[in-house]
Image: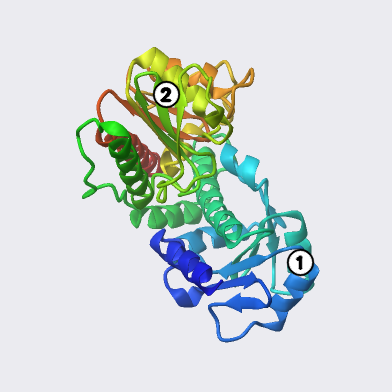
């Protein structure tokens, strides 16, 4: 149990979610409550007693994320409502508790996977595993980041209440410390060959996406087409730990691997059919998501562009409003497109390196466009 706690503490640090180990408390229940701290506080014991959980994370995000969350807390609302589609699906909304009182925190955590406690940080739970608490923590960090910058942008463009001059100045200050971390990542320019080579290349590409901040590790997906076969990451897999989490399925849907394959397998198949490409990566780059939401929600039959990159609507899966009906055609010309409020897809005829560079280029462009909008 202590090994699991140490593993997820390292992930919090490696993903840049917290700045140092002292900012994170991790708790896991087995025959007793294990933790990375010297003792288990009474308030934490009360939460385990009140809730049907096996794990708990209490942590203050790294300074930029925490400053952004603090800006959102100024509204004095009891709920923060995310605006991106992934957060709306996965965490719905984020309760706000103004002080760490076990009863109030327990009530908030009884209805959601995590909450924000003013002056303290984020508290998340896992019913079965510490991994669940980690995913919820990462998701709240993503959701609040996207909401803050999206709200400011839509206020400047007339689609939300206009921020004050002080709020705009604060946003510019936060923006000045943000940069894309894609430089120095070395992926092979060659098309991988053979099953072991393909799996190794997919694992390297997944690690590169997480390292560059182009996806939170448990979201996004990645695939490669080899003849009539598709190698694709499994649903819920961590992109920086893909060994053993890659399925080999078929283009015609005849393999039982579809049960565990990414929920966006159908979209990948259709992209391959229309574009003739070999490689697809899908991430959730933050400013690509933010810029895709400029102007409000996008109807299913509508399309817009961000810097020449198509933005389409669509839901996960193969339903009537599934992104498999809108995304593949949008990717035919430039081999990259954004699903509004969701994330970016990029493909390549040859390598994960080229697809990664496309994904990173779209995010760099969106970050530049956001900075330009803030100067207006």
Tell me if I can see residue 258 in this picture. Answer: yes
Q: Quadrant of residue 87?
A: top right
Task: Check disc 2: other Cα within 10 Å, few if <14, some if 14-19, many if 20+.
Answer: few
Q: Does 115 appear above or below 91?
A: below
In three-dimensional space, the C-alpha distance between marks 1 and 2, rounded to whole angstroms, equals 43 Å
Percent x, y for residue 351? 26, 31
- Which residue lies under the disc numbered 2? 305
Q: Are marks 1 and 2 in contact (CB under 8 Å)?
A: no
Q: Quadrant of residue 118?
A: bottom right
Q: Nearer the viewer, residue 14 or 204?
A: 204
Q: Residue at x 56, y 62 (%)?
A: 70
Determine whether, in the image, residue 204 is placed left or right of residue 146: left
The C terminus sits in image quarter? top left
Tell me the element at label 2.
strand
Q: Nearer the viewer, residue 19 or 233?
A: 233
Which sits earlier in the primary sequence, circle 1 or circle 2?
Answer: 1
- Which residue lies under the disc numbered 1? 106
Percent x, y for residue 264? 52, 29
Q: Nearer the viewer, residue 352 or 76?
A: 352
Percent x, y for residue 363? 35, 39
What numbered label is drawn on residue 71?
none
Q: Does 291 appear above or below 131?
A: above
Percent x, y for residue 297? 59, 29
The N terminus sits in image quarter? bottom right
Query: From the viewer's perspective, is the residue at label 1 or at label 2 nearer?
Result: 1
Task: Check disc 1: other Cα within 10 Å, few if <14, some if 14-19, many if 20+.
Answer: many
Determine whether, in the image, residue 265 is placed left or right of residue 319: left
Q: Quadrant of residue 335?
A: top left
Determine whether, in the image, residue 152 is placed left or right of residue 93: left
């Amino acid at each position: 149990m202590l090994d699991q706690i140490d593993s997820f503490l390292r992930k919090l640090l490696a993903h840049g979610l917290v700045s140092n180990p002292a900012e994170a408390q991790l708790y896991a229940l087995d025959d007793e409550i294990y933790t990375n701290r010297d003792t288990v506080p009474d308030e934490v014991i009360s939460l385990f007693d009140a809730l049907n959980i096996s794990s708990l994370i209490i942590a203050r995000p790294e300074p930029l994320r925490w400053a952004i969350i603090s800006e959102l807390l100024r509204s004095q609302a009891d709920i923060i409502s995310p605006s991106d589609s992934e957060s709306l699906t996965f965490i719905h909304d984020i309760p706000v508790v103004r002080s760490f009182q076990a009863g109030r925190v327990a009530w908030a955590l009884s209805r959601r996977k995590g909450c924000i406690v003013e002056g303290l940080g984020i508290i998340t739970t896992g019913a079965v595993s510490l991994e669940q608490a980690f995913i919820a923590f990462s998701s709240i960090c993503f959701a609040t980041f996207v909401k803050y910058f999206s709200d400011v942008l839509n206020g400047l463009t007339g689609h939300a209440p206009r921020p004050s001059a002080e709020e705009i100045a604060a946003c510019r200050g936060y923006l000045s410390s943000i940069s894309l971390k894609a430089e120095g990542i070395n992926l092979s320019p060659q098309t991988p060959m053979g099953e072991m080579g393909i799996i190794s290349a997919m694992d390297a590409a997944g690690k590169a996406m997480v390292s560059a901040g182009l996806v939170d590790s448990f979201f996004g997906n990645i695939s490669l087409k080899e003849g009539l076969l598709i190698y694709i990451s499994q649903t819920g897999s961590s992109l920086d730990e893909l060994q053993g989490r890659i399925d080999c399925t078929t283009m015609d849907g005849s393999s039982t691997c579809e049960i565990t394959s990414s929920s966006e397998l159908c979209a990948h198949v259709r992209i391959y059919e229309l574009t003739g490409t070999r490689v697809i990566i899908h991430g959730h780059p933050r400013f690509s998501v933010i810029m895709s939401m400029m102007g409000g929600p996008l109807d299913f039959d509508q399309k817009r562009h961000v810097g020449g990159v198509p933005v389409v609507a669509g839901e996960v899966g193969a339903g009537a409003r599934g992104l498999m009906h809108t995304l593949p055609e949008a990717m035919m010309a430039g081999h990259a497109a954004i699903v509004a409020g969701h994330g970016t897809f990029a493909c390549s005829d040859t390598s994960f390196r080229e697809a990664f560079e496309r994904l990173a280029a779209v995010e760099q462009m969106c970050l530049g466009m956001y900075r330009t909008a803030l100067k207006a």
